[in-house]
Amino acid sequence: MSDKKTNYMTGMRLYGEGKNAEAIEAFEAALAEDPEWGDCLQALSMAQMNSGDLETALANSLRLTELTPTDPLAFTGLSMIYQRLDRIDDAETAQNKARMLSWKQELKENPDTPPPMGINVVQ
């Protein structure tokens, strides 16, 4: 297994154990090898959020949404961080984007899928 994958997996284990500071170090080591690795950036921002470093988590989450603009999980994580920052309007906007992206992905598999609750679609 490559060093970046080893660091990522170590970070995931540590994150699961609630050891956010150590997980952050492992994720940062993995990202040093692959700065645009979306899954690792997502994990890093969640560990930062859970450690209370909300501004850094927000910056990394925003970067993730730029790197992966069609990933609903990226916008869900962004919404969670905005909630913790008490930026409720931004949180709702990010969550609506996540729901819309998820619905668009579902439409590819099932074209008859109705829109998510709270999403008005003009036909």
Image (cartoon, grey):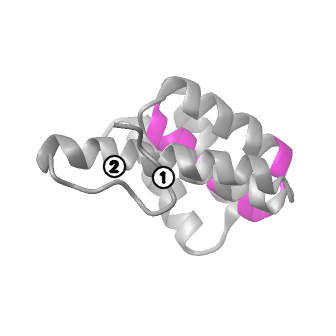
Q: Earlier in the sequence, mark 2 or mark 1?
A: 2
Magenta stretch bounds: 37-55
In the displayed structure, 56 sits above or below 113; it is above
Residue at numbered disc 2:
103
Q: Is residue 102 visible?
A: yes
User: Is residue 38 in the magenta section?
Assistant: yes
Which residue shows up at 43% across the image and 54% down it? Answer: 9
Query: Would you say 10 lies left or right of 27 here?
Result: left
Label 1 is placed on what type of residue? Ile
Q: Position of residue 45 (x, y in %)?
A: 65, 47
The secondary structure making up most of the magenta span is helix
Which residue shows up at 78% across the image and 51% down it? Answer: 89
Q: Position of residue 3 (x, y in %)?
A: 43, 37
Query: Would you say 43 lies left or right of 84 here?
Result: left
User: Is residue 15 in the magenta section?
Assistant: no
Label 2 is placed on what type of residue? Trp
Image quadrant holding the C terminus, namely: top left
In the displayed structure, 29 sits above or below 92; it is above
Q: The residue tagged with tag 2: helix, strand or loop?
A: helix
Which residue shows up at 56% across the image and 32% down it? Answer: 65
To which quarter of the image does residue 114 belong? bottom left
Q: Which mark is residue 77?
A: none
Label 2 vs label 1, nearer the camera: 1
Taking depth in this image into account, of 100 and 35 the one nearest to the observer is: 100
Taking depth in this image into account, of 23 and 83 the one nearest to the observer is: 83
Q: Position of residue 49 (x, y in %)?
A: 73, 57
Q: Which mark is residue 119?
A: 1
